[in-house]
Amino acid sequence: MKVDIKELENFLDDHIQDLVDLRRELHKKAELSGDEKKTAEFVIKVLKETNPDKIIENVGGCGVIAVYGEEKSGPDLMIRAELDALPIPDSPDLEYASENPDTGHKCGHDGHMTIVLGVARWLGENKPPKGRVYLLFQPAEETGEGAARILKDEKFSEISPYMAMALHNLPGYPAHSVIVREGTFTSASVGIEMKLKGTSSHAGYPEDGRSPAAAMAQIVNMLPGIAAQEFPRSTNALITIIHASVGKRAFGTTPGNAVVMATLRANSNEVLKEMKTHVLKRCRAIAESWGLTFSEDFVEPFDATINDDSCVDILTEAAEKLDLKIIRPDNPFPWSEDFGAFSQKFTGLLFCLGSGKEHPQLHHPDYDFPDELLQTGIKLFLLQLHKYWQQAQN
Ligand SMILES: [Zn+2]
Ligand SMILES: [Zn+2]
């Protein structure tokens, strides 16, 4: 079967103003990771109007899955959007500013949801000829917890996608350009929080305590170099210091505790695992050399996102049909995406859509999703779905 681009454009012309309004409604509802109740309710309401064959609610928290099509041998395809916003205040002069203080859609997830709701509208009128399409609205992307929770939820085991895809908008690139690469697209990463415990003392008698200050300084100095000097450049290993603190604002007391936090990144889960072992070994040795107790916690883990070659081909074909500029970065992006967890489990594709070269960066206080990308995102997803259906029918 063939998708008629003209027909698709007419459909979008009819729906676009309503979709822009939907995006703004979602923008107003901005909710933090893990607490996306009202957003999910709204998404469910819009999905119901499209008569899906099934809606699965409360998956991995506030997650929602709409199912289109019946069991017919064919590719079961999943498209993912994210429900959560960020703890960043919205621009107050925006007419559709967030109604929740200190919470804003500063990563464009309101736009991604609207794109997938646009796909839902099309699927409501054009049921898949083969297999099923699952539209997943996942919670808690920003903290890297949502995808893992979805995968663990029993309700998710009801569905078994052959492949999963998602897009993210990306400032700094021309609007409507498609950014994609085969293999690793975004890095694996994890936060490490290290605690150094010594003993406090009177500041006049530092020799009677055990201050962790020097060990903390040594660790902060050493950590970034481990990535640069001990891992080949091809691994994209990177260690960034996030936070370091020692003692309290008490001039009569030497400190007894210190904390160092850093983020580790690499282009594969395997390299990241090696980095974790290496970092722990080195930092623990420093702490012990100063007679301190050392403990660690790993937080906010993200898998690397791995793109399947044939999925990249299908996306490229869709982008070419729409005359979109295709940009293929030489290296994986240093940032991480929760979608990595899906790409480790299913055939996966994550790609970006340029938000404009001068558009404020993601997570910047002035960022707002560019509505002009809605149509492009919907068309790209639908053209890809049609290609998978076409392949299944041949
Ligand atoms: Zn983000
Ligand atoms: Zn995001």
Image (cartoon, rainbow, N blue to C red):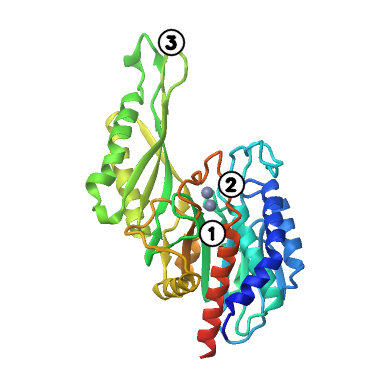
Marking on residue 252: 3
Q: Quadrant of residue 93?
A: top right
User: Is label 2 within 8 A of ligand 2 (CB to nearest ligand atom)?
Assistant: no
Which residue is identified by label 1? 148
Name the residue: 38% across, 51% down: 334
The answer to which of marks 2 and 3 sits earlier in the sequence is: 3
- The amino acid type found where label 2 is placed reads Asp
Q: Nearer the viewer, residue 151 or 5?
A: 5
Q: Which mark is residue 46?
A: none
* 390 relative position to 312: left or right: right
Q: Amino acid at mark 1?
A: Ala
Secondary element type, mark 1: helix
Decide: few, some or many residues near mark 1? Use Cα within 10 Å; few <14, some 14-19, many ≥20: many
Q: Would you say 384 lies left or right of 123 here?
A: left
- Given the image, on which type of amino acid does mark 3 rest? Gly
Residue at the spot of label 2? 368
User: What residue is at 52 percent from the left and 41 percent from the top?
Assistant: 364
Above or below residue 192? Residue 236 is: below
Q: Helix, strand, or loop for circle 2?
A: loop
Q: Earlier in the sequence, mark 1 or mark 3?
A: 1
**Is any atom of residue 237 visible in this view?**
yes
Q: Position of residue 252 (x, y in %)?
A: 43, 10
Gap between marks 2 and 3, in whole Å? 48 Å
Q: Earlier in the sequence, mark 1 or mark 2?
A: 1
- Tag 2 and tag 3, C-beta contact below 8 Å: no
Q: Position of residue 368 (x, y in %)?
A: 58, 46
For label 3, being within 8 Å of ligand 1 is answered no
**Residue 372 drawn above or below residue 33:** below
Where is 244 relative to 273, above or below?
Answer: above
Is any part of residue 37 visible from this angle?
no
Tell me the SS state at disc 3.
loop
Q: Is mark 1 within 8 Å of ligand 2?
A: no
